[in-house]
């Protein structure tokens, strides 16, 4: 029985323990060196409209929010997203794979009046900016992920506007 127990101990010490130590080291370094960490988050900008005029804009750094209302009037206001809103949007972007999106998702030479969206996340060491046209014909999963992120941002902006009006 002693020989079997010593074989198991040898197996654990020579294979499993080094493997676990390597995993902790490897993934620890990945998390530590992640380029887009919320602790380094500085601001977010969101712009949308037609290609020739992006009149709808939000900048989380300044709180400037401008949009076109139902009466085609430009509405300007100061509005801050909460830290929880920004953390939610950062995590949603990470869940949807935003950091791997191509920077240019536009349709060159298109004559359609499809909306254009520009989403920018600014961090201390990096900035991620994506330009997305609503008529972009790229991979279906990429288009869906862009549309979902846009809806989340618009939803958070709408919630913040409602909080401001109360």
Image: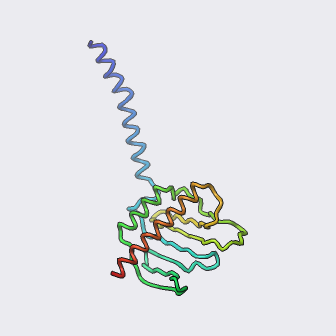
Looking at the picture, tell me which residue is in the foreground, 10 or 109. 109
**Residue positioned most to the left:** 2
Which residue is located at x 42 percent, y 78 percent? Answer: 63
Q: Quadrant of residue 163?
A: bottom left
Above or below for 8 versus 138: above
Q: Where residue 49 appears, x then y in whole percent?
A: 58, 76
Q: Quadrant of residue 147?
A: bottom right
Q: Quadrant of residue 136?
A: bottom right
Looking at the picture, tell me which residue is in the foreground, 122 or 81. 81
Which residue is located at x 36 percent, y 71 percent? Answer: 82
Above or below for 49 versus 93: below
73 horizontally vs 139: left or right: left
Q: Where residue 4 appears, x then y in whole percent?
A: 31, 15
Q: Which quadrant is home to the N terminus? A: top left
Query: What's the image's color scheme?
Result: rainbow
Above or below for 66 versus 22: below
138 horizontally vs 66: left or right: right
Looking at the picture, tell me which residue is in the foreground, 45 or 159. 159
State the count of labels: 0
Q: Where residue 154 appears, x then y in whole percent?
A: 47, 71
Which residue is located at x 45 percent, y 59 percent? Answer: 36
Q: Where residue 89 appears, x then y in whole percent?
A: 43, 64
Q: Which quadrant is home to the C terminus? A: bottom left
């Amino acid at each position: 029985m002693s020989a079997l127990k010593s074989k198991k101990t040898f197996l654990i010490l020579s294979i499993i323990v080094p493997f676990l130590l390597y995993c902790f080291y490897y993934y620890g370094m990945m998390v530590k060196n992640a380029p887009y960490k919320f602790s380094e988050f500085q601001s977010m900008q969101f712009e949308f409209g037609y290609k020739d005029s992006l009149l709808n804009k939000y900048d989380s750094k300044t709180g400037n929010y401008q949009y076109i209302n139902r009466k085609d009037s430009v509405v300007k206001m100061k509005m801050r997203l909460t830290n929880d809103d920004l953390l939610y949007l950062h995590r949603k972007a990470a869940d949807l794979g935003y950091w791997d999106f191509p920077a240019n998702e536009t349709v060159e030479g298109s004559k359609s009046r499809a909306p254009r969206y520009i989403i920018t996340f600014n961090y201390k060491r990096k900035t991620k900016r994506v330009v997305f046209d609503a008529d972009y014909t790229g991979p279906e999963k990429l288009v869906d992920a862009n549309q979902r992120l846009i809806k989340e941002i618009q939803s958070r902006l709408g919630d913040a506007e409602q909080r401001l009006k109360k």
